[in-house]
Amino acid sequence: MDTGENEYRIARFRERLARDDMAELGVRIEARGSAVLLTGTVPTATHREEILRLAETELAGLPVHADLTVACIDPPERPEELL
């Protein structure tokens, strides 16, 4: 595959993440040589898995490396003590 086609597929994947039910704008997608790197923070593990599934579909044939962190949005287990 040529670089232009890879860039097109990456751009299409970015647009799909932004417009689908996910409305995910916090994931950075970069071409790194012949591979693609996904970085950022997502709200849930389910969201992360969906992004990886979409990446596998949209970027089939390209190595995809993911460094996606799941944000902890759970409330604290106990109240914070202020001194």
Image (cartoon, rainbow, N blue to C red):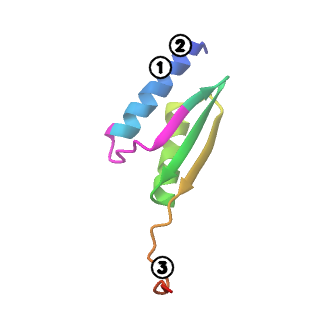
Residue that mark 3 sits on: 76
Q: Which residues are magenta?
A: 19-29
Residue that mark 1 sits on: 8
As measured in the structure, the alpha-carbon distance from the residue carrying label 1 to the one carrying label 2 is 6 Å
Q: Residue at x 37, y 47 (%)?
A: 22
> Which three-letter amino acid code belongs to the residue tagged 1?
Tyr
Q: Secondary structure at mark 1?
A: helix
Question: Do residues under tags 3 and 1 come within 8 Å of each other at their CB atoms?
Answer: no
The furthest residue to the front: 83
Q: Is residue 20 magenta?
A: yes
> Which three-letter amino acid code belongs to the residue tagged 3?
Pro
Q: Earlier in the sequence, mark 3 or mark 1?
A: 1
Left or right: residue 61 compared with residue 13: right
Q: Position of residue 35 (x, y in %)?
A: 65, 29
Of the two numbered discs 3 and 1 in the rendering, the one whose residue sits closer to the viewer: 3
Left or right: residue 15 compared with residue 63: left
Q: Earlier in the sequence, mark 3 or mark 2?
A: 2
> Which three-letter amino acid code belongs to the residue tagged 2?
Gly
Q: Residue at x 52, y 20 (%)?
A: 7
Q: Residue at x 45, y 32 (%)?
A: 13
Q: Position of residue 59 (x, y in %)?
A: 54, 30
